[in-house]
Image (cartoon, grey):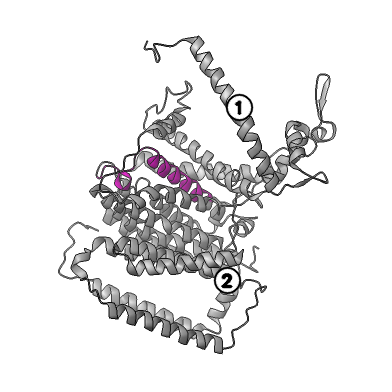
Amino acid sequence: MSTIAPEFRLSRFIASLTDIIFWVLLIFSLVGLPIVFIVLFYIKLPVINGQLMTPYLAMTWMADPSRSIPIIKSFMHTTIFRVAVFPGFGFAALLAAATIYVERKFLAKIQLRVGPLYCGKIEGILQLMGDGFKLMSKEIIIPAKADKPIFWIGPVLFVGTAGAFVSLIPVAPGWVVANPSVGLLAVFATIGFFPIIAVLSAWSANSKWTFIGGLRALHQMIAFEIPLILSLLGIVILSGTLNLSQIVQSQEHYWWITFMPLSAVVFFITIIAELERIPFDLPEAESEIVAGWLTEFSGMMYGLIQLGTYLKLYAFAGLFTVLFLGGWQGPSIWPPFPQEIITQGITIGPVTAKFPGLPLFDQEMLNGTLWFVIKTVGVILLILLPRGVFPRVRIDMILHTGWYKLIGLAFINIFIALGLLYAGVLGPGGLLH
Amino acid sequence: MADAVFLALSVLTIGCAIVALEIRSLIYGSIALMLTLSGIAGFFLLLDAPFVAMFQLSVYVGSIAVLILFTVMLVRRELIFNKIEDKRRRYAGIGLMIALMLTIGTIIIGSGIKTMETNSSAIDYKKIGEDFLTYYSPALIVMALILASSIVGALALAKREDVENEQRTD
């Protein structure tokens, strides 16, 4: 039994705690509260219950739980909430974090191992948090001959591009961060930035491993970008739009995977190659070139790259769901919000609390989100599966697959889509529309 | 708002173009070229042409700039360039540029595009597709032929018959 702190005294611990609490309270009341008020005076406050919220009212309403729900509701419809929390970064990062944990347990079960076990007592559920703290506390080492500006900005750009990709994925009807009319083209434009970032950060580290890894990443991503774009053209032809939300709406009666399974297979293979996952993980081949283009990243820089990779994984899985599996479409299984809470409030013993403004989310949105998450998690598990069973392929085989076979299959799929369109079966004005 | 964005984009685009020409490091030059091309994509977005903007990003930044970067990384700089410092050439270049811009400016102003309607809605990409397949179809066919012939030419140039690929077994 080892002791973490042999000089531990409870009295000193309590004294330091009270000390910290004192300073926090002092700084908050002297600096924090004035800053809150100044910010509240400058930002545009919403009209709630027919009354413009002034900063004074804001403070009293935040203290009253029955009146704070309208404030939360109005906050949920702001852009910053969408970008930071729900369909944007926070939601995706949560799913990405869950993916990392599930991937480790899932692969362990496939290979008859146990995976993370000790951290957090129950099946190592806190392992991810521990890894995060470890990465944050580690030193960031910059190679002496590295090109410092590019090396520093590489991981940040990677996360930023992954976040831009995430922002284009519609989660529920009307719940999407950015909804351009050319959403699918915006996805292609965003994907095009990943090889640039990979090869620039690989070059800037000034090491053989990273440079070879970066060149491999560039070869692979460029080879697979073309079948990726071509495989999705069939859907554009049949649904007649480039907007991702409208593509989801066009799948109200049937999913596109039923008519274009070939396209779905090609797109799935290109997803795995773009994500540099086994069997296409040549850019990070750990048994050949240490860690490929990630070799020189340490500490939180590596953590940022990992975050970006898993955000990208979520975004690709979400894109697959949106394009082939009907996005948020599905039977309504979410229970409706109980009416008596809205009309009568919640009664606990002698106290009755009324909550005007409930429910926070409408049923359609919650149902859509549920279906989207179920389908996306299924696709993510399918993407994770090959890692447990396949070996790595050779670079000439991967390029051959990308440039010859997948492009050929994608063209066949385009002709199938055109045939369905001209036969009058599908598409605008088709039989099944 | 749009004016501020336009000014920022102009500074970014022109500044990065100058950097791309002037900087010594080829890698930074190609990064600056990428920023210039992205700035042009921003101009297209300001002009309510998201279709063209996205193609600008995915083709010019995502493919052409990547190819330039690739080439720069694989080729050693000293072997292909030798430095020529010539003041007169630089001034002649600047003079030529000003003359060219003045000519193009007079042509544009003389052509009658003086007023722009700012409230018109964005052009739908479906309209662009229709136009390409109806009125502009000869141009489309000519472009396709040019691209196809250049691809065939590139393949013919890149093919080497003296190299035997021993690894490939299929």
Q: Nearer the viewer, residue B153 or A65?
A: A65
Residue B77 lies in what quarter of the image? bottom left
**What is the quadrant of the C terminus of chain B in the image?**
bottom left
Label 1 to label 2: alpha-carbon separation: 52 Å
What's under tag 1, amino acid-wise? Leu
Say whether mark 2 and mark 1 are on the same chain: no
Residue drawn at x 44%, y 36% is A103
Image position, residue B73 (x, y; %): 27, 60
Camera-near label (1 vs 2) is 1
Q: Is residue A303 magenta?
A: yes
What's under tag 2, amino acid-wise? Leu
Image position, residue A175 (x, y; %): 64, 50
Q: Secondary structure at mark 2?
A: loop
**What is the quadrant of the N terminus of chain B in the image?**
bottom right
Q: Is residue B121 magenta?
A: no
Residue located beneath label 1 in the image: A26
- Residue A361 at least partly seen: no
Letter of the chain that mark 1 sits on in the rendering: A
Instruction: From the viewer's perspective, tell me whether residue A126 is left or right of residue A256.
Output: left
Q: Nearer the viewer, residue A68 or A292?
A: A68
Please tell me how many numbered marks the rendered image carries: 2
Image position, residue A291 (x, y; %): 30, 43
For the magenta stretch, what is the residue range? A289-318
Residue drawn at x 33%, y 45% is A294
Letter of the chain that mark 2 sits on in the rendering: B
Residue drawn at x 41%, y 39% is A303
Residue located beneath label 2 in the image: B47
Residue drawn at x 53%, y 60% is A184
Q: Nearer the viewer, residue A275 or A400?
A: A275
Q: Residue furthest left?
A: B162
Q: Secondary structure at mark 1?
A: helix
